């Protein structure tokens, strides 16, 4: 049996009427002879409402209890979708992360999938049932309920598709596919028919909210085709493939992340082991750092600047202030009003002058660049967040992304 994994996000199952439309789509696919595994998120803003409820009870809810609470959101949507399929004469079974054999590590709120016991899913598929799995959750080896963090349903879908050796993995969302920029910022942005795993990973990690980066990592590792498709229509969406299957383009897209913060620890002693101490302390607190810049030291001291998600800022500042005193550094300063603007493209590694062109586009609009970071297919600039819209539009226009046509190699 060919298996296809489909993931439906919160907006796709936000109302009983939308759930019924999803049921019809699934049954249409099953009628073609496919085995269907549907991964479903919590309805609409359920997760946000549960978090708000928790904050009204506790200013700092224990992570274990928060995972216990948040995991209930997906249970509502999977059971309702199963009912909708049964109502239409189909056969379906809903499964939590525990019931579907998704084994994770023990990190509450940010767990990673370690194993999937596929027999839990294959048996009902062989019986002719649609298997509906709760996204975003799993269970640790100690039988504790865990969640995978924001966007975790994408990760669940990709991991299941890889483990089940599925024909493909389809991510249904409220947009038509992956665009050259956020259409809310750039009305001229165009939908891409194709993009590589590597490019999508960079875009997702730089603020594009169409896919979670971990889902793309899994797909890239296992050579799994991903499709981002609109839940509101039967459009073709965007197919994410191995880079060797696509023609190279200098710049595929431009993206922005406004939820960033910048922290600098000043006049740190410049000696071996200091960086390990700083970033080891942040790692123990579960704080992920996006960008690290160390300035040229004067004498025996140096400044270390990090860029990270704004949600981590308060905890990171607390950790670094404590270390600053221990290390006899000058102190810690921070700025919550920064954003990161990035361009991504498989062809920029062999094309000279791409960075200069990006910087000129920003300079023409008098947008100051505070920090710069690069990979072989990405260039990112940290700027003040008030300039995000203007910066993204300027770069998109300068690279003529509104006329981009991506083709198979």
Image (cartoon, helix red, strand yellow):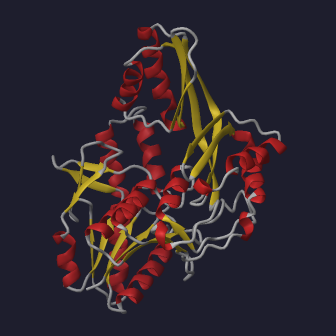
State the residue in front, 371 or 185.
Answer: 371
Q: Which residue appears at 42% of the width and 14% of the height?
A: 271
Is any part of residue 267 visible from this angle?
Answer: no
- Numbered circles on residues, count: 0
Q: Position of residue 345 (x, y in %)?
A: 59, 58
Instruction: Look at the picture and state if 306 lies above or below 409.
Output: above
Instruction: Look at the picture and state if 42 lies above or below 176.
Output: above
Q: Which residue appears at 59% of the width and 68% of the height?
A: 175
State the residue in front, 316 or 70.
Answer: 316
Q: Is 213 on the left or on the right of 69, as rendered?
A: right
Q: Is 343 on the left or on the right of 88, as rendered?
A: right
Q: Position of residue 263 (x, y in %)?
A: 56, 26
Instruction: Look at the picture and state if 155 lies above or below 298.
Output: below
Q: Which residue appears at 45% of the width and 80% of the height?
A: 20
Q: Which quarter of the image is occupied by the N terminus?
A: bottom left
Instruction: Look at the picture and state if 75 lies above or below 257.
Output: below
Q: Position of residue 386 (x, y in %)?
A: 73, 40
Q: Position of residue 136 (x, y in %)?
A: 36, 57
Q: Which quarter of the image is occupied by the C terminus?
A: bottom right
Is any part of residue 124 visible from this angle?
Answer: yes
Q: Is 382 on the left or on the right of 153, as rendered?
A: right
State the residue in front, 349 or 318.
Answer: 349
Q: Which residue appears at 41% of the width and 61% of the height?
A: 154
């Amino acid at each position: 049996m060919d298996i296809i994994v489909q993931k439906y996000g919160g907006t796709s199952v936000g109302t009983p009427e939308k759930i019924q439309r999803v049921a019809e789509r699934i049954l249409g696919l099953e009628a073609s002879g496919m085995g269907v595994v549907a991964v479903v998120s919590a309805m609409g803003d359920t997760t946000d409402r549960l978090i708000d409820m928790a904050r009204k009870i506790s200013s700092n809810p224990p992570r274990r209890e928060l995972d216990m609470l948040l995991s209930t959101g997906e249970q509502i949507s999977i059971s309702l979708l199963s009912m909708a399929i049964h109502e239409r004469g189909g056969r379906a079974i809903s499964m939590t992360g525990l019931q579907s054999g998704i084994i994770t590590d023990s990190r509450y709120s940010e767990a990673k999938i370690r194993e999937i016991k596929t027999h839990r899913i294959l048996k009902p598929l062989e019986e002719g049932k649609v298997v509906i799995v709760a996204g975003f959750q799993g269970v640790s080896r100690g039988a504790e309920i865990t969640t995978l963090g924001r966007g975790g349903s994408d990760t669940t879908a990709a991991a299941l598709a890889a483990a089940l050796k599925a024909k493909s993995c389809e991510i249904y969302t409220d947009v038509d596919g992956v665009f050259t920029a956020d259409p809310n910022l750039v009305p001229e942005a165009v939908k891409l028919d194709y993009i590589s795993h590597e490019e999508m990973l960079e875009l997702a990690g730089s603020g594009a909210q169409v896919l979670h980066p971990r889902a793309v990592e899994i797909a890239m590792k296992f050579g799994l085709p991903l499709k981002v498709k609109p839940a509101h229509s039967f459009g073709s969406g965007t197919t994410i493939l191995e880079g060797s299957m696509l023609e190279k383009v200098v710049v595929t897209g431009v993206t922005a992340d406004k939820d960033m913060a910048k922290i600098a620890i000043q006049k740190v002693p410049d000696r071996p082991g200091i960086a390990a101490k700083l970033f080891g302390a942040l790692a123990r607190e579960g704080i992920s750092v996006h960008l690290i810049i160390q300035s040229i030291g004067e004498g025996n001291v140096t400044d270390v600047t990090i860029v990270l998600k704004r949600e981590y800022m308060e905890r990171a500042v607390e950790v670094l202030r404590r270390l600053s005193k221990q290390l006899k550094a000058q102190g810690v300063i921070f700025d919550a009003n920064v954003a990161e603007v990035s361009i991504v493209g498989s062809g920029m590694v062999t094309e000279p002058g791409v960075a200069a062109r990006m910087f000129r586009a920003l300079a023409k609009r008098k947008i100051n660049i505070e920090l710069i970071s690069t990979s072989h297919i990405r260039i990112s600039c940290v700027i003040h967040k008030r300039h995000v819209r203007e910066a993204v539009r300027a770069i998109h226009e300068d690279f003529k992304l509104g006329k981009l046509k991506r083709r198979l190699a």
